[in-house]
Image (spheres, helix red, strand yellow):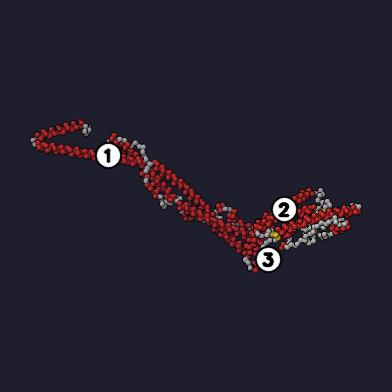
Amino acid sequence: MLAIGSPNYSVRTSTSCNALLRELQQIWSDIGESEAEKDRILMELERECLEVYRRKVEEAANAKARLHQTVAAKEAELATLMAALGELNIHSPIQTEKRSMSLKEKLASIAPLVEDLRTKKEERMKQFADIKAQIEKISGEISGYDHLSNSLINSLSLEEEDLSLRRITECQTHLRTLQKEKSDRLNRVLEYVNEVHSICGVLGLDFGQTVSDVHPSLHGTAMGHSTNISNSTLEGLEHAIVKLKAERKIRIQKLKDIVVSLFELWNLMDSPIQDKNSFSKITSILRLSESEITEPGVLSTEVIEQASTEVERLTKLKATRMKELVLKKRSELEEICKMTHIEPDTSTAAEKSNAMIDSGLVDPSELLANIEAQIIKVKDEALSRKDIMDRIDRWLFACEEEKWLEEYNQDDNRYNAGRGAHINLKRAERARVTVSKIPAIVDNLINRTLAWEEEKKIFFLYDGVRLVSILDDYKLTRVQREEEKKRCRDQKKMQDLLLTEKEAIYGSKPSPRKSNSFRKPNGCRANGNGSMTPTPRRNSIGSGTPELLTPRSYSSRQNGHFREMRRLSTAPLNFVAISKEDTMSSYTSVCGSEPGSPPQG
Protein backbone atom coordinates (compact mmCIF):
# COMPACT_ATOMS: atom_id res chain seq x y z
CA MET A 1 0.00 0.00 0.00
CA LEU A 2 1.39 3.27 -1.05
CA ALA A 3 1.66 6.00 1.47
CA ILE A 4 -0.10 9.25 0.85
CA GLY A 5 2.31 11.90 -0.43
CA SER A 6 4.88 9.41 -1.74
CA PRO A 7 6.08 9.88 -5.40
CA ASN A 8 4.66 6.55 -6.59
CA TYR A 9 1.38 7.34 -4.97
CA SER A 10 1.28 10.76 -6.72
CA VAL A 11 2.19 9.28 -10.13
CA ARG A 12 -0.41 6.61 -9.84
CA THR A 13 -3.03 9.11 -8.77
CA SER A 14 -2.09 11.48 -11.57
CA THR A 15 -2.21 8.65 -14.12
CA SER A 16 -5.63 7.57 -13.00
CA CYS A 17 -6.96 11.14 -13.09
CA ASN A 18 -5.50 11.76 -16.52
CA ALA A 19 -6.98 8.53 -17.90
CA LEU A 20 -10.35 9.41 -16.51
CA LEU A 21 -10.05 12.94 -17.86
CA ARG A 22 -9.18 11.62 -21.32
CA GLU A 23 -12.05 9.21 -21.14
CA LEU A 24 -14.35 12.09 -20.10
CA GLN A 25 -13.11 14.24 -22.93
CA GLN A 26 -13.67 11.41 -25.39
CA ILE A 27 -17.18 11.10 -24.10
CA TRP A 28 -17.70 14.82 -24.38
CA SER A 29 -16.34 14.70 -27.93
CA ASP A 30 -18.71 11.91 -28.79
CA ILE A 31 -21.55 13.86 -27.25
CA GLY A 32 -20.43 17.11 -28.77
CA GLU A 33 -20.34 19.18 -25.65
CA SER A 34 -19.35 22.73 -26.00
CA GLU A 35 -16.15 24.11 -24.63
CA ALA A 36 -17.97 26.23 -22.16
CA GLU A 37 -19.81 23.24 -20.78
CA LYS A 38 -16.57 21.34 -20.61
CA ASP A 39 -14.91 24.17 -18.68
CA ARG A 40 -17.86 24.36 -16.29
CA ILE A 41 -17.77 20.67 -15.58
CA LEU A 42 -14.01 20.68 -15.13
CA MET A 43 -14.25 23.58 -12.65
CA GLU A 44 -17.01 21.74 -10.81
CA LEU A 45 -14.85 18.62 -10.65
CA GLU A 46 -11.93 20.64 -9.33
CA ARG A 47 -14.14 22.25 -6.65
CA GLU A 48 -15.53 18.92 -5.55
CA CYS A 49 -12.03 17.50 -5.28
CA LEU A 50 -10.97 20.44 -3.12
CA GLU A 51 -13.96 19.93 -0.87
CA VAL A 52 -13.08 16.29 -0.41
CA TYR A 53 -9.44 17.14 0.39
CA ARG A 54 -10.49 19.93 2.71
CA ARG A 55 -12.91 17.64 4.54
CA LYS A 56 -10.29 14.96 4.89
CA VAL A 57 -7.74 17.46 6.18
CA GLU A 58 -10.19 18.76 8.72
CA GLU A 59 -10.99 15.25 9.88
CA ALA A 60 -7.29 14.46 10.19
CA ALA A 61 -6.68 17.71 12.07
CA ASN A 62 -9.51 16.96 14.46
CA ALA A 63 -8.16 13.46 15.02
CA LYS A 64 -4.72 14.89 15.72
CA ALA A 65 -6.13 17.43 18.18
CA ARG A 66 -8.08 14.76 20.02
CA LEU A 67 -5.06 12.52 20.12
CA HIS A 68 -2.89 15.38 21.36
CA GLN A 69 -5.42 16.19 24.03
CA THR A 70 -5.53 12.57 25.12
CA VAL A 71 -1.76 12.44 25.34
CA ALA A 72 -1.69 15.71 27.28
CA ALA A 73 -4.36 14.41 29.67
CA LYS A 74 -2.42 11.20 30.17
CA GLU A 75 0.76 13.16 30.76
CA ALA A 76 -1.03 15.41 33.23
CA GLU A 77 -2.55 12.42 35.03
CA LEU A 78 0.82 10.74 35.05
CA ALA A 79 2.42 13.84 36.56
CA THR A 80 -0.37 14.11 39.14
CA LEU A 81 -0.05 10.46 40.11
CA MET A 82 3.70 10.72 40.30
CA ALA A 83 3.43 13.81 42.50
CA ALA A 84 0.76 12.26 44.71
CA LEU A 85 2.61 8.98 45.09
CA GLY A 86 6.00 10.64 45.34
CA GLU A 87 7.28 8.53 42.41
CA LEU A 88 9.81 11.01 41.07
CA ASN A 89 12.28 8.44 39.75
CA ILE A 90 10.03 6.85 37.10
CA HIS A 91 11.36 7.22 33.50
CA SER A 92 8.53 9.24 31.98
CA PRO A 93 8.09 9.89 28.22
CA ILE A 94 7.42 13.48 29.17
CA GLN A 95 11.06 13.89 29.91
CA THR A 96 12.11 12.61 26.37
CA GLU A 97 12.31 14.71 23.22
CA LYS A 98 8.80 15.48 22.05
CA ARG A 99 9.70 15.36 18.30
CA SER A 100 11.24 11.96 18.50
CA MET A 101 7.91 10.21 19.06
CA SER A 102 4.47 10.48 17.44
CA LEU A 103 1.37 11.12 19.46
CA LYS A 104 0.22 7.53 19.22
CA GLU A 105 3.62 6.31 20.38
CA LYS A 106 3.54 8.70 23.28
CA LEU A 107 0.05 7.57 24.17
CA ALA A 108 1.07 3.94 23.93
CA SER A 109 4.06 4.51 26.22
CA ILE A 110 2.18 6.64 28.81
CA ALA A 111 -0.95 4.49 29.16
CA PRO A 112 0.73 1.53 30.98
CA LEU A 113 2.48 3.85 33.43
CA VAL A 114 -0.79 5.59 34.20
CA GLU A 115 -2.53 2.28 34.82
CA ASP A 116 0.23 1.10 37.12
CA LEU A 117 0.15 4.34 39.08
CA ARG A 118 -3.64 4.16 39.30
CA THR A 119 -3.38 0.69 40.82
CA LYS A 120 -0.71 1.84 43.24
CA LYS A 121 -2.85 4.84 44.18
CA GLU A 122 -5.81 2.61 44.95
CA GLU A 123 -3.60 0.48 47.21
CA ARG A 124 -2.24 3.58 48.91
CA MET A 125 -5.77 4.91 49.34
CA LYS A 126 -6.83 1.67 51.04
CA GLN A 127 -3.76 1.84 53.30
CA PHE A 128 -4.50 5.49 54.15
CA ALA A 129 -8.14 4.66 54.76
CA ASP A 130 -7.19 1.93 57.24
CA ILE A 131 -4.75 4.22 59.08
CA LYS A 132 -7.30 7.03 58.99
CA ALA A 133 -9.98 4.79 60.50
CA GLN A 134 -7.68 3.71 63.32
CA ILE A 135 -6.56 7.29 64.00
CA GLU A 136 -10.15 8.53 64.04
CA LYS A 137 -11.21 5.67 66.33
CA ILE A 138 -8.40 6.17 68.84
CA SER A 139 -8.69 9.96 68.69
CA GLY A 140 -12.40 9.61 69.32
CA GLU A 141 -11.74 7.36 72.32
CA ILE A 142 -9.23 9.82 73.70
CA SER A 143 -11.42 12.86 73.10
CA GLY A 144 -14.59 11.07 74.06
CA TYR A 145 -16.06 11.51 70.54
CA ASP A 146 -17.13 14.96 71.58
CA HIS A 147 -14.81 17.20 69.63
CA LEU A 148 -12.37 15.75 67.17
CA SER A 149 -9.83 18.42 66.34
CA ASN A 150 -10.33 20.28 63.05
CA SER A 151 -6.62 20.07 62.28
CA LEU A 152 -6.80 16.28 62.43
CA ILE A 153 -9.85 16.21 60.12
CA ASN A 154 -8.17 18.56 57.63
CA SER A 155 -4.96 16.52 57.66
CA LEU A 156 -6.90 13.34 56.99
CA SER A 157 -8.99 14.91 54.19
CA LEU A 158 -5.85 15.93 52.30
CA GLU A 159 -4.60 12.39 52.01
CA GLU A 160 -5.56 12.05 48.30
CA GLU A 161 -3.28 14.93 47.41
CA ASP A 162 -0.34 13.40 49.24
CA LEU A 163 -0.09 9.61 49.11
CA SER A 164 3.67 9.41 49.34
CA LEU A 165 5.58 6.99 51.50
CA ARG A 166 6.71 9.91 53.63
CA ARG A 167 3.07 10.77 54.33
CA ILE A 168 2.29 7.13 55.16
CA THR A 169 5.25 7.02 57.53
CA GLU A 170 4.03 10.19 59.27
CA CYS A 171 0.53 8.79 59.64
CA GLN A 172 1.85 5.50 60.96
CA THR A 173 4.02 7.36 63.46
CA HIS A 174 1.01 9.38 64.53
CA LEU A 175 -1.00 6.19 64.84
CA ARG A 176 1.66 4.55 67.02
CA THR A 177 1.76 7.66 69.22
CA LEU A 178 -2.01 7.51 69.64
CA GLN A 179 -1.85 3.77 70.36
CA LYS A 180 0.76 4.37 73.07
CA GLU A 181 -1.31 7.18 74.56
CA LYS A 182 -4.35 4.90 74.48
CA SER A 183 -2.38 2.17 76.26
CA ASP A 184 -1.13 4.64 78.89
CA ARG A 185 -4.61 6.02 79.42
CA LEU A 186 -6.06 2.54 79.67
CA ASN A 187 -3.47 1.62 82.32
CA ARG A 188 -4.27 4.80 84.24
CA VAL A 189 -7.97 4.06 84.05
CA LEU A 190 -7.37 0.51 85.32
CA GLU A 191 -5.18 1.81 88.17
CA TYR A 192 -7.83 4.35 89.13
CA VAL A 193 -10.58 1.74 88.93
CA ASN A 194 -8.57 -0.67 91.12
CA GLU A 195 -7.94 2.08 93.66
CA VAL A 196 -11.63 2.99 93.67
CA HIS A 197 -12.47 -0.70 94.15
CA SER A 198 -10.06 -0.97 97.10
CA ILE A 199 -11.32 2.17 98.85
CA CYS A 200 -14.97 1.26 98.21
CA GLY A 201 -14.29 -2.14 99.78
CA VAL A 202 -12.80 -0.55 102.89
CA LEU A 203 -15.65 1.97 103.15
CA GLY A 204 -18.33 -0.61 102.36
CA LEU A 205 -19.63 1.39 99.35
CA ASP A 206 -21.12 0.07 96.07
CA PHE A 207 -18.20 -0.07 93.65
CA GLY A 208 -20.35 -0.56 90.54
CA GLN A 209 -22.50 2.46 91.27
CA THR A 210 -19.46 4.59 92.06
CA VAL A 211 -17.66 3.94 88.76
CA SER A 212 -20.91 3.99 86.77
CA ASP A 213 -21.46 7.54 87.98
CA VAL A 214 -18.16 8.42 86.33
CA HIS A 215 -18.86 6.50 83.07
CA PRO A 216 -21.00 3.41 82.38
CA SER A 217 -18.23 1.71 80.40
CA LEU A 218 -16.12 1.43 83.57
CA HIS A 219 -18.48 -1.08 85.15
CA GLY A 220 -17.98 -4.76 84.34
CA THR A 221 -21.59 -5.20 83.22
CA ALA A 222 -21.09 -2.93 80.20
CA MET A 223 -19.43 -5.63 78.10
CA GLY A 224 -20.68 -4.25 74.78
CA HIS A 225 -18.68 -1.05 75.09
CA SER A 226 -14.96 -0.48 75.26
CA THR A 227 -13.54 1.21 78.33
CA ASN A 228 -13.75 4.96 78.01
CA ILE A 229 -10.34 6.60 78.34
CA SER A 230 -11.23 10.22 77.66
CA ASN A 231 -9.99 13.14 79.71
CA SER A 232 -13.40 13.53 81.31
CA THR A 233 -13.30 9.92 82.48
CA LEU A 234 -9.81 10.30 83.93
CA GLU A 235 -10.79 13.54 85.64
CA GLY A 236 -13.95 11.91 86.93
CA LEU A 237 -12.00 8.99 88.38
CA GLU A 238 -9.44 11.34 89.96
CA HIS A 239 -12.25 13.37 91.51
CA ALA A 240 -13.94 10.20 92.74
CA ILE A 241 -10.67 8.98 94.33
CA VAL A 242 -10.10 12.34 96.04
CA LYS A 243 -13.65 12.27 97.36
CA LEU A 244 -13.29 8.67 98.56
CA LYS A 245 -9.96 9.40 100.25
CA ALA A 246 -11.47 12.40 102.01
CA GLU A 247 -14.36 10.23 103.18
CA ARG A 248 -11.91 7.53 104.28
CA LYS A 249 -9.87 10.08 106.24
CA ILE A 250 -13.01 11.40 107.94
CA ARG A 251 -14.15 7.90 108.86
CA ILE A 252 -10.70 6.90 110.11
CA GLN A 253 -10.56 9.93 112.38
CA LYS A 254 -14.11 9.33 113.53
CA LEU A 255 -13.41 5.67 114.23
CA LYS A 256 -10.13 6.52 115.99
CA ASP A 257 -11.99 8.94 118.26
CA ILE A 258 -14.54 6.24 118.97
CA VAL A 259 -11.80 3.67 119.65
CA VAL A 260 -10.02 6.08 122.01
CA SER A 261 -13.30 6.58 123.86
CA LEU A 262 -13.76 2.81 123.94
CA PHE A 263 -10.32 2.28 125.46
CA GLU A 264 -10.96 4.95 128.07
CA LEU A 265 -14.34 3.48 128.96
CA TRP A 266 -12.97 -0.07 129.00
CA ASN A 267 -10.21 0.99 131.36
CA LEU A 268 -12.61 2.90 133.56
CA MET A 269 -15.24 0.18 133.62
CA ASP A 270 -12.76 -2.71 133.77
CA SER A 271 -14.57 -4.35 130.88
CA PRO A 272 -13.96 -8.08 130.35
CA ILE A 273 -11.66 -9.36 127.60
CA GLN A 274 -14.61 -10.86 125.71
CA ASP A 275 -16.18 -7.42 125.20
CA LYS A 276 -12.88 -6.02 123.95
CA ASN A 277 -12.19 -8.92 121.58
CA SER A 278 -15.47 -8.33 119.75
CA PHE A 279 -14.06 -4.96 118.63
CA SER A 280 -10.51 -6.11 117.86
CA LYS A 281 -11.18 -5.54 114.17
CA ILE A 282 -11.55 -1.79 114.61
CA THR A 283 -9.13 -1.25 117.49
CA SER A 284 -6.30 -2.38 115.25
CA ILE A 285 -6.59 0.81 113.15
CA LEU A 286 -4.82 2.78 115.90
CA ARG A 287 -1.58 0.99 114.98
CA LEU A 288 -2.02 1.39 111.22
CA SER A 289 -1.46 4.29 108.86
CA GLU A 290 -4.14 5.37 106.40
CA SER A 291 -2.61 3.45 103.50
CA GLU A 292 -2.29 0.26 105.59
CA ILE A 293 -6.03 0.05 106.35
CA THR A 294 -7.18 -2.31 103.60
CA GLU A 295 -9.48 -4.80 105.33
CA PRO A 296 -12.86 -4.80 103.55
CA GLY A 297 -15.68 -3.17 105.48
CA VAL A 298 -13.52 -1.99 108.39
CA LEU A 299 -14.64 1.63 107.78
CA SER A 300 -18.23 0.89 106.80
CA THR A 301 -21.06 2.87 108.35
CA GLU A 302 -22.33 -0.32 110.00
CA VAL A 303 -19.04 -0.86 111.85
CA ILE A 304 -18.88 2.79 112.92
CA GLU A 305 -22.50 2.70 114.12
CA GLN A 306 -21.82 -0.51 116.03
CA ALA A 307 -18.81 1.06 117.78
CA SER A 308 -20.78 4.25 118.48
CA THR A 309 -23.59 2.19 120.01
CA GLU A 310 -21.07 0.47 122.29
CA VAL A 311 -19.67 3.84 123.36
CA GLU A 312 -23.17 5.08 124.15
CA ARG A 313 -23.92 1.95 126.16
CA LEU A 314 -20.71 2.24 128.17
CA THR A 315 -21.31 5.96 128.66
CA LYS A 316 -24.72 5.28 130.17
CA LEU A 317 -23.21 2.59 132.38
CA LYS A 318 -20.44 4.98 133.30
CA ALA A 319 -23.00 7.55 134.53
CA THR A 320 -24.30 5.06 137.11
CA ARG A 321 -20.78 4.40 138.38
CA MET A 322 -19.45 7.93 138.13
CA LYS A 323 -18.84 8.36 141.83
CA GLU A 324 -16.77 5.19 141.92
CA LEU A 325 -14.87 6.32 138.84
CA VAL A 326 -14.14 9.71 140.37
CA LEU A 327 -12.69 8.11 143.49
CA LYS A 328 -10.71 5.68 141.34
CA LYS A 329 -9.26 8.51 139.26
CA ARG A 330 -8.46 10.46 142.43
CA SER A 331 -6.60 7.44 143.78
CA GLU A 332 -4.70 7.22 140.51
CA LEU A 333 -3.80 10.92 140.79
CA GLU A 334 -2.61 10.50 144.37
CA GLU A 335 -0.55 7.46 143.44
CA ILE A 336 1.16 9.35 140.61
CA CYS A 337 1.80 12.32 142.93
CA LYS A 338 3.22 10.00 145.55
CA MET A 339 5.59 8.41 143.05
CA THR A 340 6.72 11.80 141.74
CA HIS A 341 6.70 13.55 145.18
CA ILE A 342 4.26 16.20 143.98
CA GLU A 343 1.51 17.49 146.23
CA PRO A 344 -1.92 16.62 144.71
CA ASP A 345 -4.55 19.28 144.21
CA THR A 346 -6.72 19.39 147.33
CA SER A 347 -9.76 20.70 145.44
CA THR A 348 -10.56 17.18 144.22
CA ALA A 349 -9.77 15.29 147.42
CA ALA A 350 -11.87 12.21 148.05
CA GLU A 351 -13.90 13.77 150.88
CA LYS A 352 -14.60 16.94 148.91
CA SER A 353 -15.47 14.99 145.77
CA ASN A 354 -17.94 12.77 147.62
CA ALA A 355 -19.53 15.78 149.26
CA MET A 356 -19.86 17.69 145.99
CA ILE A 357 -21.31 14.69 144.12
CA ASP A 358 -23.79 13.91 146.89
CA SER A 359 -24.89 17.53 147.13
CA GLY A 360 -25.28 17.85 143.36
CA LEU A 361 -23.13 21.00 143.25
CA VAL A 362 -20.95 19.64 140.47
CA ASP A 363 -21.43 17.35 137.51
CA PRO A 364 -19.51 14.09 138.06
CA SER A 365 -18.35 14.15 134.46
CA GLU A 366 -16.83 17.59 134.93
CA LEU A 367 -15.21 16.50 138.17
CA LEU A 368 -13.80 13.42 136.45
CA ALA A 369 -12.54 15.55 133.57
CA ASN A 370 -10.92 17.91 136.09
CA ILE A 371 -9.12 15.02 137.77
CA GLU A 372 -8.01 13.65 134.41
CA ALA A 373 -6.67 17.09 133.51
CA GLN A 374 -4.78 17.14 136.83
CA ILE A 375 -3.32 13.72 136.00
CA ILE A 376 -2.12 14.98 132.62
CA LYS A 377 -0.67 18.09 134.29
CA VAL A 378 1.14 16.01 136.93
CA LYS A 379 2.55 13.68 134.27
CA ASP A 380 3.82 16.65 132.25
CA GLU A 381 5.34 18.19 135.36
CA ALA A 382 6.93 14.87 136.29
CA LEU A 383 8.48 14.73 132.85
CA SER A 384 10.02 18.18 133.30
CA ARG A 385 11.26 17.19 136.81
CA LYS A 386 12.76 13.88 135.70
CA ASP A 387 16.36 15.08 135.45
CA ILE A 388 16.28 16.61 138.95
CA MET A 389 14.42 13.61 140.40
CA ASP A 390 17.07 11.27 139.03
CA ARG A 391 19.73 13.34 140.75
CA ILE A 392 17.69 13.30 143.98
CA ASP A 393 17.70 9.51 143.77
CA ARG A 394 21.48 9.57 143.41
CA TRP A 395 21.71 11.84 146.46
CA LEU A 396 19.42 9.63 148.54
CA PHE A 397 21.39 6.57 147.52
CA ALA A 398 24.59 8.30 148.61
CA CYS A 399 22.95 9.19 151.95
CA GLU A 400 21.92 5.58 152.46
CA GLU A 401 25.48 4.50 151.74
CA GLU A 402 26.72 7.07 154.24
CA LYS A 403 24.34 5.77 156.90
CA TRP A 404 25.43 2.20 156.24
CA LEU A 405 29.09 3.24 156.38
CA GLU A 406 28.60 4.90 159.77
CA GLU A 407 26.92 1.81 161.17
CA TYR A 408 29.68 -0.31 159.67
CA ASN A 409 32.39 1.88 161.27
CA GLN A 410 30.71 1.50 164.69
CA ASP A 411 30.85 -2.27 164.46
CA ASP A 412 33.75 -3.52 166.68
CA ASN A 413 33.87 -6.83 164.84
CA ARG A 414 34.07 -5.49 161.33
CA TYR A 415 37.69 -6.61 160.90
CA ASN A 416 37.14 -10.12 162.18
CA ALA A 417 37.79 -12.82 159.62
CA GLY A 418 34.22 -13.96 159.41
CA ARG A 419 32.07 -14.97 156.47
CA GLY A 420 31.26 -12.01 154.24
CA ALA A 421 33.77 -9.68 155.88
CA HIS A 422 35.66 -9.11 152.63
CA ILE A 423 32.40 -8.25 150.89
CA ASN A 424 31.65 -5.59 153.52
CA LEU A 425 35.17 -4.22 153.16
CA LYS A 426 34.71 -3.82 149.42
CA ARG A 427 31.31 -2.20 149.93
CA ALA A 428 32.81 0.14 152.50
CA GLU A 429 35.42 1.25 149.99
CA ARG A 430 32.74 1.92 147.40
CA ALA A 431 30.59 3.69 149.99
CA ARG A 432 33.48 6.00 150.93
CA VAL A 433 33.90 6.97 147.27
CA THR A 434 30.17 7.61 146.97
CA VAL A 435 30.01 9.62 150.22
CA SER A 436 32.91 11.77 149.07
CA LYS A 437 30.80 12.89 146.12
CA ILE A 438 27.83 14.03 148.23
CA PRO A 439 28.86 17.74 148.47
CA ALA A 440 29.32 17.95 144.70
CA ILE A 441 26.00 16.15 144.14
CA VAL A 442 24.19 18.56 146.46
CA ASP A 443 25.74 21.65 144.88
CA ASN A 444 24.96 20.43 141.38
CA LEU A 445 21.40 19.60 142.45
CA ILE A 446 20.93 23.10 143.91
CA ASN A 447 22.20 24.74 140.72
CA ARG A 448 19.97 22.64 138.51
CA THR A 449 16.97 23.24 140.76
CA LEU A 450 17.52 27.00 140.72
CA ALA A 451 17.84 26.90 136.91
CA TRP A 452 14.61 24.92 136.71
CA GLU A 453 12.84 27.42 138.97
CA GLU A 454 14.17 30.31 136.89
CA GLU A 455 12.88 28.69 133.72
CA LYS A 456 9.49 27.66 135.10
CA LYS A 457 9.03 30.74 137.32
CA ILE A 458 7.85 28.49 140.19
CA PHE A 459 9.44 26.74 143.17
CA PHE A 460 10.53 23.11 142.83
CA LEU A 461 8.57 21.41 145.63
CA TYR A 462 9.35 17.96 146.98
CA ASP A 463 6.36 16.62 148.91
CA GLY A 464 5.20 20.19 149.43
CA VAL A 465 8.56 21.57 150.56
CA ARG A 466 10.91 23.61 148.43
CA LEU A 467 13.79 21.39 147.44
CA VAL A 468 16.36 24.21 147.67
CA SER A 469 15.38 24.76 151.33
CA ILE A 470 15.82 21.04 152.02
CA LEU A 471 19.24 21.10 150.37
CA ASP A 472 20.33 24.23 152.22
CA ASP A 473 19.24 22.72 155.55
CA TYR A 474 21.05 19.52 154.62
CA LYS A 475 24.26 21.42 153.88
CA LEU A 476 23.95 23.35 157.18
CA THR A 477 23.28 20.17 159.14
CA ARG A 478 26.20 18.46 157.41
CA VAL A 479 28.50 21.32 158.40
CA GLN A 480 27.27 21.09 161.99
CA ARG A 481 27.81 17.35 161.94
CA GLU A 482 31.35 17.76 160.65
CA GLU A 483 31.98 20.29 163.43
CA GLU A 484 30.54 17.82 165.95
CA LYS A 485 32.86 15.13 164.66
CA LYS A 486 35.78 17.53 164.96
CA ARG A 487 34.72 18.34 168.54
CA CYS A 488 34.63 14.61 169.33
CA ARG A 489 38.11 14.22 167.91
CA ASP A 490 39.28 17.10 170.11
CA GLN A 491 37.64 15.49 173.12
CA LYS A 492 39.46 12.22 172.38
CA LYS A 493 42.75 14.08 172.23
CA MET A 494 41.85 15.72 175.54
CA GLN A 495 41.03 12.33 177.04
CA ASP A 496 44.39 10.97 175.96
CA LEU A 497 46.08 14.02 177.47
CA LEU A 498 44.25 13.58 180.80
CA LEU A 499 45.11 9.90 180.93
CA THR A 500 48.77 10.74 180.37
CA GLU A 501 48.73 13.34 183.17
CA LYS A 502 46.96 10.95 185.52
CA GLU A 503 49.58 8.29 184.86
CA ALA A 504 52.28 10.82 185.61
CA ILE A 505 50.59 11.79 188.92
CA TYR A 506 49.77 8.28 190.26
CA GLY A 507 52.68 6.47 188.67
CA SER A 508 50.66 3.57 187.24
CA LYS A 509 48.70 2.97 184.05
CA PRO A 510 45.02 2.31 184.55
CA SER A 511 43.71 -1.04 183.47
CA PRO A 512 41.82 -1.23 180.18
CA ARG A 513 38.63 -2.12 182.02
CA LYS A 514 39.01 0.86 184.32
CA SER A 515 39.92 3.20 181.52
CA ASN A 516 36.93 2.04 179.58
CA SER A 517 34.74 2.79 182.58
CA PHE A 518 34.98 6.46 181.77
CA ARG A 519 31.75 7.78 180.36
CA LYS A 520 31.93 8.32 176.63
CA PRO A 521 31.85 11.88 175.40
CA ASN A 522 28.46 13.09 174.30
CA GLY A 523 27.65 11.97 170.79
CA CYS A 524 30.78 9.74 170.55
CA ARG A 525 31.51 6.06 171.06
CA ALA A 526 34.63 3.96 170.99
CA ASN A 527 35.17 1.79 167.99
CA GLY A 528 37.15 -1.42 167.79
CA ASN A 529 40.56 0.21 167.65
CA GLY A 530 39.98 2.59 170.51
CA SER A 531 39.16 5.63 168.35
CA MET A 532 35.97 7.61 168.84
CA THR A 533 33.41 7.84 166.04
CA PRO A 534 30.30 10.02 166.00
CA THR A 535 27.06 8.26 166.84
CA PRO A 536 24.16 9.29 164.52
CA ARG A 537 21.23 10.68 166.46
CA ARG A 538 17.89 12.13 165.54
CA ASN A 539 17.89 15.90 165.38
CA SER A 540 15.82 17.02 168.31
CA ILE A 541 15.99 19.85 170.77
CA GLY A 542 18.97 19.32 172.98
CA SER A 543 20.61 16.54 170.92
CA GLY A 544 24.33 16.57 170.54
CA THR A 545 24.66 15.46 166.90
CA PRO A 546 22.38 17.05 164.26
CA GLU A 547 20.51 14.60 162.01
CA LEU A 548 21.15 14.95 158.25
CA LEU A 549 17.78 16.05 156.89
CA THR A 550 17.00 14.37 153.57
CA PRO A 551 13.78 14.66 151.53
CA ARG A 552 12.55 11.46 153.20
CA SER A 553 12.84 12.98 156.69
CA TYR A 554 11.10 16.11 155.40
CA SER A 555 8.31 14.00 153.93
CA SER A 556 7.39 12.72 157.41
CA ARG A 557 6.61 16.24 158.60
CA GLN A 558 3.11 17.64 158.18
CA ASN A 559 2.53 20.52 155.75
CA GLY A 560 6.25 21.27 155.56
CA HIS A 561 6.39 22.61 159.16
CA PHE A 562 9.89 22.62 160.61
CA ARG A 563 11.18 23.31 164.02
CA GLU A 564 14.19 25.55 164.15
CA MET A 565 17.36 23.76 165.02
CA ARG A 566 19.50 25.07 167.82
CA ARG A 567 22.94 25.91 166.65
CA LEU A 568 25.52 24.24 168.81
CA SER A 569 28.72 25.86 170.00
CA THR A 570 31.82 24.12 168.75
CA ALA A 571 34.55 26.26 170.47
CA PRO A 572 37.36 23.97 171.78
CA LEU A 573 38.53 24.13 175.39
CA ASN A 574 41.78 25.95 176.19
CA PHE A 575 43.64 23.41 178.30
CA VAL A 576 46.87 25.38 178.40
CA ALA A 577 45.67 28.31 180.51
CA ILE A 578 44.07 26.20 183.34
CA SER A 579 45.55 24.37 186.30
CA LYS A 580 45.58 20.63 186.87
CA GLU A 581 42.68 20.80 189.27
CA ASP A 582 40.72 22.83 186.79
CA THR A 583 41.78 20.35 184.15
CA MET A 584 40.41 17.43 186.14
CA SER A 585 37.19 19.29 186.86
CA SER A 586 36.91 20.13 183.20
CA TYR A 587 37.49 16.47 182.32
CA THR A 588 34.79 15.45 184.78
CA SER A 589 32.36 17.98 183.34
CA VAL A 590 33.08 16.88 179.79
CA CYS A 591 33.22 13.13 180.16
CA GLY A 592 30.76 12.85 183.02
CA SER A 593 27.86 14.55 181.25
CA GLU A 594 24.88 12.45 180.25
CA PRO A 595 24.60 11.38 176.63
CA GLY A 596 22.36 13.72 174.76
CA SER A 597 23.35 16.76 176.90
CA PRO A 598 25.53 19.34 175.15
CA PRO A 599 28.82 20.22 176.83
CA GLN A 600 28.92 23.49 178.68
CA GLY A 601 31.60 25.80 177.39
Question: Marks 3/2: CA distance?
Answer: 44 Å
Measured as percent of width and height from the top left, residue 457 is found at 65, 59
Return the x and y of residue 127 as percentages of the image width and height: 39, 43
Q: Looking at the image, which is closer to me, 223 or 241?
A: 241
At label 2, the amino acid type is Ala
Query: Is label 2 in a helix, a strand or a loop?
Result: helix
The amino acid beneath tag 1 is His
| Res. 29 in view | yes
Residue occupying the point 67% across, 61% down: 344
Q: Position of residue 335 (x, y in %)?
A: 68, 59
**Element on which disc 1 rests:** helix
Secondary element at image label 3: helix
Q: Is residue 295 visible?
A: no
For disc 3, the marked residue is 351
Q: Which mark is residue 68?
A: 1
Amino acid beneath label 3: Glu
Query: Is disc 2 surrounded by few (<14), some (14 to 19) or many (20+) residues within 10 Å?
Result: few
The mark that comes first in sequence, 3 or 2, is 3
Outermost residue, front side: 577
Of the image marks 3 and 1, the number of the one nearer the N terminus: 1
Could you tell me residue 337's position as x and y percent?
A: 68, 59
Which residue lies at the image location 46% right of the left edge and 47% below the top edge? 181
Question: Marks 1/2: CA distance?
Answer: 127 Å
Point out the tag, 1 or 2, that comes first from the N-terminus: 1
Q: Residues within 10 Å of mark 1 (few under 14, many from 20)?
A: some
Tell me: residue 104, above or below residue 437. above
> Label 2 belongs to which residue?
440
* Numbered disc in front, either 3 or 2: 2
Image side of residue 115 versus residue 287, left or right: left
Q: Residue at x 62, y 59 (%)?
A: 264
Residue at point 72% right, 58% down?
Answer: 472
Q: Quadrant of residue 331?
A: bottom right
